[in-house]
């Protein structure tokens, strides 16, 4: 009898133990599922820009001064009115655009028909609650330095320098503008380039690297002014404070004004630029970068500017600003 009771109690205990194991396993599975759901919700909730203004400096966009709420488009052109019309028509749609300044260095002034067309497309494409100003900055001589001349009536701190043959989506431009507002003294742009010490030559000689060098190394030290934001103060520094010999070199060689601006900003800030990821649409034909000997000429510019500044001011970095709202993994 005792044996029967003992066996019965033992079987009962074993059953309770099995039920407990099953229950614990079920709880573990439920906890695991809950953790997975919570993790997915966390990822979805955390999809905010990497360089959002609020997270970077703890301020809402409305707290910025009026001069930093918009930007001026500074577009360089040369006898390509068809490309100019496409570019102006596109950028007029960008919500933070305040004004458009066309760097005009052609021997003949812009025609009235061109002015009329551009004003029409700006009025047609810009937001109804704002008025975008259009101005031609007329220059008497043809020089690449013209694109960095000071603009007396510029109302915004931010300048978006762009060539007439490339277009970026307004969403990318607006994101880059937000990045610039978090670091307004630096250059923020879409086209990175790199420099390095030339191991084949003198220890003090530098080489210029194009896009494929940036892609291979994951490093850059410049963003080209063909598509970049910078503070308007650098227009005055470039024209009136930077060594005149650098501007003469740019004028004589018709090249490297963008490298000179990168040197200037790095010399002032002691910091690297910020590369913003963005899709580029080229609407023009190939430029001087496709010509033979381009990299060597650019390397000569780098070394000449090092001599003029008496040091290498460029700072290399591996940081890239990415708008995480447009990607799943970042």
Image (cartoon, rainbow, N blue to C red):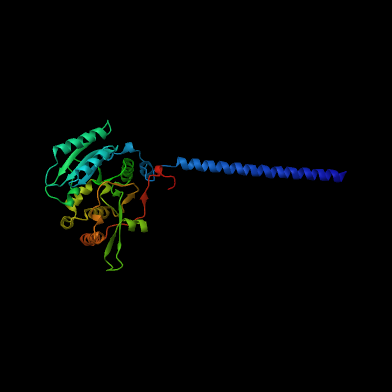
Q: Quadrant of residue 61?
A: top left
Query: x and y percent of residue 243 in the render?
Result: 18, 56
Of the pair 121 and 255, the residue shown nearer to us? 121
Q: What residue is shown at x 20% (from left), y 51% (from top)?
A: 238
The answer to whether 252 appears left or right of 70 in the picture is: left
Query: x and y percent of residue 41 in the render?
Result: 49, 40
Query: x and y percent of residue 71 in the render?
Result: 26, 41
Say if 197 sits above or below 143 in the image: below
The answer to whether 7 appears left or right of 102 in the picture is: right
Q: What residue is shown at x 32% (from left), y 36% (from top)?
A: 62
Say if 149 sits above or below 245 in the image: above
Of the pair 34 and 78, the residue shown nearer to us? 78
Using the rendered image of the protein, determine whether residue 296 is visible from the camera's viewpoint: yes
Q: What residue is shown at x 65% (from left), y 44% (from top)?
A: 25
The answer to whether 172 appears left or right of 107 in the picture is: right
- Please tell me how many numbered marks the rendered image carries: 0
């Amino acid at each position: 009898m005792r044996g029967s009771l003992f066996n019965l109690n033992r079987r009962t205990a074993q059953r309770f133990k099995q039920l407990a194991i099953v229950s614990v396993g079920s709880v573990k599975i439920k906890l695991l599922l809950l953790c997975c759901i919570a993790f997915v919700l966390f990822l979805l909730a955390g999809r905010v820009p990497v360089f959002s203004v609020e997270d970077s400096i703890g301020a809402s966009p409305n707290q910025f001064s009026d001069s930093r709420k918009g930007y001026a488009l500074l577009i360089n052109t040369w006898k390509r009115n068809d490309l100019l019309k496409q570019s102006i028509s596109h950028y007029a749609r960008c919500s933070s655009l305040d004004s458009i300044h066309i760097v005009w260095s052609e021997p003949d002034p812009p025609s009235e028909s061109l002015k009329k067309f551009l004003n029409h497309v700006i009025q047609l494409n810009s937001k109804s609650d704002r008025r975008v100003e259009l101005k031609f900055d007329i220059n008497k001589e043809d020089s690449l330095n013209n694109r960095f001349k000071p603009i007396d009536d510029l109302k915004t701190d931010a300048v978006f320098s762009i060539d007439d043959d490339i277009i970026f989506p307004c969403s990318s431009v607006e994101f880059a503008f937000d990045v610039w507002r978090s670091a307004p003294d630096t250059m923020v742009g879409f086209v990175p380039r790199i420099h390095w010490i030339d191991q084949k030559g003198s220890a003090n000689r530098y080489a210029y690297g194009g896009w494929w060098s940036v892609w291979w190394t994951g490093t850059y030290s410049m963003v080209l002014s063909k598509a970049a934001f910078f503070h308007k103060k650098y227009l005055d520094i470039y024209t009136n404070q930077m060594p005149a010999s650098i501007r003469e070199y740019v004028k004589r060689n018709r090249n490297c004004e963008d490298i000179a601006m990168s040197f200037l900003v790095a010399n002032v800030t002691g910091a690297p630029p910020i590369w913003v990821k963005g899709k580029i649409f080229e609407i023009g034909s190939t430029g001087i970068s496709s010509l033979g000997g381009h990299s060597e000429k650019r390397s000569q510019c780098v070394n000449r500017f090092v001599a003029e500044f008496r040091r290498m001011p460029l700072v290399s970095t591996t940081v890239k600003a990415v708008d995480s709202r447009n990607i799943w993994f970042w």
